[in-house]
Amino acid sequence: EITISNGQRTHLLKEYEIPLAGNYKLFYYTVDSANFATIFRGEQGKSYSMKIKVAGKEYNAKTSIPFLTKKVDSLSWETVKQKDDTSKVILYGQTTDPPGFGNYIRYFTSTNNGPFFPGLNSVFDDQIVDGETYKVQIEQGVNRNEEIDFEEYSFFERGDSIVVKMTNIDRATFDFWRTIEYSYSSIGNPFSSPTKVLTNLDGGALGYFGGYSVQYTSIKIPD
């Protein structure tokens, strides 16, 4: 069983299953509408805990939902100058980092009403941009279940409708995705150092329990 708590209410999540091809099933947990009295909404600036009980063992994790202090101020684009194909464009975002270290972000993109995918490197801290306003390329998010064209994946195309999902996260969520993305990028490299994926679950479990505060910003690239 899995329970989540905001310190005042504790809600027992319900298991659901989705049949997949090849007699496989996908299992997931979410709120149980039959226990509406204990359901609660996540809030910025609040902390939460999760408890998992399985096979006689117990695993615990804590997270927080930060205030949405780091946002995309504006989006812009330009044609890829190094390509003969003028349909390819680079997306840029301007953002302002609040003063004081410890602002962690993760971003996703959606193209033409498609699903949101995280960037190949989707998490960033503010070690070198603390308190600065800066402009940075926003690479198109990738589906890691499909083959990635590493020369073209980051570009968008003329005519695309793009939504950028900017999220503020806590340090534990940042560390999990930072280490797992580094591990992913090192696959097949015999010279890379072994990477330990950091988790905020105790008891030797792998994974994370994370909270996100979210901003959506959109732009339409002309044909």
Image (cartoon, grey):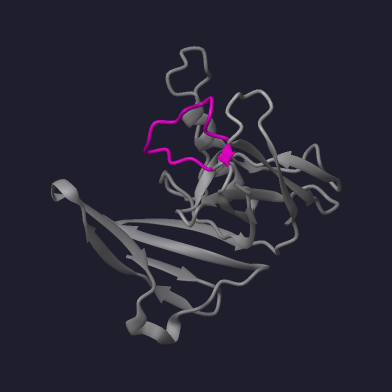
Q: Nearer the viewer, residue 158 or 47?
A: 158
Q: Nearer the viewer, residue 59 or 132?
A: 132
Type of secondary structure dominating the magenta stretch: loop
Left or right: 137, with 56 as reference point: right
Query: In which image quadrant can residue 39 be found?
Result: bottom left
Identify the residue at the far bottom of this view.
37
Vertical order, 188 against 99 (above or below): above
**Looking at the image, can residue 169 be seen?**
no
Identify the residue at the far top of this view.
191
In the picture, which quadrant includes the N terminus?
bottom left
Residue 155 part of the magenta segment: yes
**Looking at the image, can residue 100 be seen?**
yes
Vertical order, 136 against 70 (above or below): above
Residue positioned 55% across, 66% down in the render: 48
Q: Position of residue 11 (x, y in %)?
A: 42, 75
Residue positioned 45% across, 54% down in the render: 115
Residue positioned 53% across, 45% down in the render: 118
Q: Nearer the viewer, residue 53 or 174?
A: 174
Residue 153 part of the magenta segment: yes
What span is colored magenta in the figure? 141-157
Query: In which image quadrant can residue 55 be found?
Result: bottom left
Residue positioned 63% across, 37% down in the render: 89
Q: How many marks?
A: 0
Q: Position of residue 21 (x, y in %)?
A: 18, 49
Identify the residue at the far front of this view.
223
Q: Position of residue 13 (x, y in %)?
A: 36, 70
Q: Position of residue 85 (x, y in %)?
A: 57, 28
